DNA sequence: ACAGTTCTTATCAAGTTGATAATAACCAAT
DNA sequence: ATTGGTTATTATCAACTTGATAAGAACTGT
């Protein structure tokens, strides 16, 4: 009997695993990107029961030799067809959902992750449905009837949105949703998309500049040329204040 | 064949659970309380292998009919002997730890929780070791050699401390560590204990008052009588600024 | 009555915010 | 080349917040 076997025997003896039926461990992904001043989330259409045909967050099982973060990266590629080596991507753990009946088939505990994709503010990365899903597509978050999502994914999406909106007050996390080098307007568009509120350009520049590093380069569109920046500090101190949400319309 | 069985069959067919060996789901608890202007954490001494005799965070398995939050409450009572009906207690999810080798026996995924116990700032609730643990005791957090903790519990403790310290900047979470009705000094002692920094009493009063509701009552100790408050708003806006940590002395 | 302690309020310079506007740089069309 | 439209950046200023410091008030113990 190996040392490992005896350890396990002691373990099984003291904890009686029969009392603790196995749980399946999954990850669910709240994948955000910004285009056209709107925040979009990546959704897949379920190809099986339950919730057949409904939209759901991408996700999948955590493999035996990976942790949840690694599974999040793998499933992101598998379920959405994204090539992570070709996109700026930031992943962070959001929260774990463990209600016993959240999946009607069996006990499934899901570690939700927030995924932010950088982009030019115009084009969204193209999605390619994986094997489990009928299709994968971007949806504007603020126009979404999130009650139609499968499982408890409406809760998870709401948590992801609130995490992002909240962290944008006191960190430079919004820089994850633009390109590495970006203008203050591009960054401001991210704030507009997530917070659903217009921020005065002058004050935004004054405040955000302290957390950014200028590259010296400029970019020319319509109007005056805009300076390019990269992320400087991780923190915004004191924080930006999130305005009250503007009335829809 | 019931509908449920066919669902499960479909599920098993499409996901092949053999690829995904069962994981054990546990909770680990970072339990904080303040006494004598020091932040304390509840630790148990392990009564079995691995890490026999080492100190560890209290915790245990999530039962089949409870979610992680319910398990956290139950294990808090079982492992520390605390009567939750006799203490002010706040529990919130911290993060999930899922490294494949974090427990040498088998795959154990743990949902860590932050637990805050209210108190008078002098006495710590008495701990009573549960069945799994040799003993349970309070340890001053900032004097602790956390590297000696079992498993990855040093990481979890650090995450719990940082979550608490961070949220104390922009929420009134510190009120969870005092009694329901408290003086500004008592609350300031919590900040001192967690942040390891003295905050000027006058400015602390000015700032914190806006988030508290006065009860009208006063309490008398040495010096001038202090007004009693209860928590008002959940938020501190703009946030308190956490001073740079004072050099250890 | 006095010293010691603590709570609360006051003061003020320095810094930050929100609102608003002025200035500057560029394009496109006349 | 000039004009008008558009956008970026800087400036201004009153209102507010902060950090430092101290004054005033209330009570205890001797």
Image: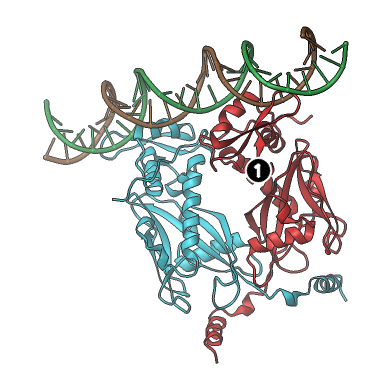
Chain colours: A red, B cyan, C green, D brown
Q: Quadrant of the N terminus of chain A?
A: bottom right
Q: Chain of mark 1?
A: A
- Name above or below for residue B13 compared with residue A165: below
Instruction: Give the answer, above or below, for where A161 lies relative to A184.
Output: below
* Residue appearing at x 78%, y 39% in the figure: A122
Residue at which label 1 appears: A180
Residue A2 placed where, x, y %?
A: 54, 89
- Location of the C terminus of chain A (image quadrant): top right
Label total for image: 1
**Residue in view at x 86 percent, y 70 percent:** B3
Residue A57 seen by the camera: yes
> In the rendered view, would you say B11 is above or below A117?
below
Residue A200, can we see it?
no
Nearer to me, B6 or B167: B167
Residue D23, by quadrant, is top left
Q: Residue B124, percent across and down?
A: 37, 57
- Position of A22 with respect to A232 (left or right) is right
Quadrant of residue A171 within the rendered picture: top right
Viewed as shown, does residue B153 lie left or right of B21? Answer: left
Q: Nearer the viewer, residue B172 or A1?
A: A1
Point 67% across, 55% down: residue: A113
Question: Under tag 1, what secondary structure?
Answer: loop
Front residue of A199/B196: it is: A199
């Amino acid at each position: 009997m190996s040392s490992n076997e005896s350890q396990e025997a002691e373990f099984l003896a003291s904890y009686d695993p029969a009392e603790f039926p196995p749980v399946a461990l999954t990850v669910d992904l709240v994948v955000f990107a910004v285009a056209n001043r709107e925040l979009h989330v990546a959704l897949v259409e379920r190809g099986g029961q339950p919730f057949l045909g409904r939209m759901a967050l991408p996700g999948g099982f955590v493999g035996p030799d990976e942790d949840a973060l690694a599974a999040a990266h793998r499933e992101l590629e598998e379920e959405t067809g994204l090539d992570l080596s070709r996109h700026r991507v930031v992943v962070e753990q959001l929260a774990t959902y463990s209600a016993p009946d959240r999946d009607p088939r069996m006990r499934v505990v899901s570690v939700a992750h927030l995924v932010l994709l950088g982009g030019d503010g115009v084009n969204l990365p193209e999605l390619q449905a994986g094997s489990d899903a009928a299709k994968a597509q971007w949806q504007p978050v603020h126009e979404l009837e999130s009650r139609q999502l499968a499982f408890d994914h409406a809760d998870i999406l709401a948590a992801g949105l609130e995490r992002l909106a909240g962290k944008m007050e006191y960190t430079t996390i919004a820089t994850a949703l633009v390109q590495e080098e970006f203008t203050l307007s591009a960054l401001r568009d991210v704030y507009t998309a997530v917070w659903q509120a217009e921020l005065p350009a002058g004050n935004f520049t004054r405040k955000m500049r302290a957390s950014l590093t200028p590259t010296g380069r400029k970019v020319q569109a319509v109007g005056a040329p805009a300076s390019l920046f990269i992320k400087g500090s991780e923190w915004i101190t004191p924080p930006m204040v999130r305005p009250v949400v503007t009335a829809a319309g």
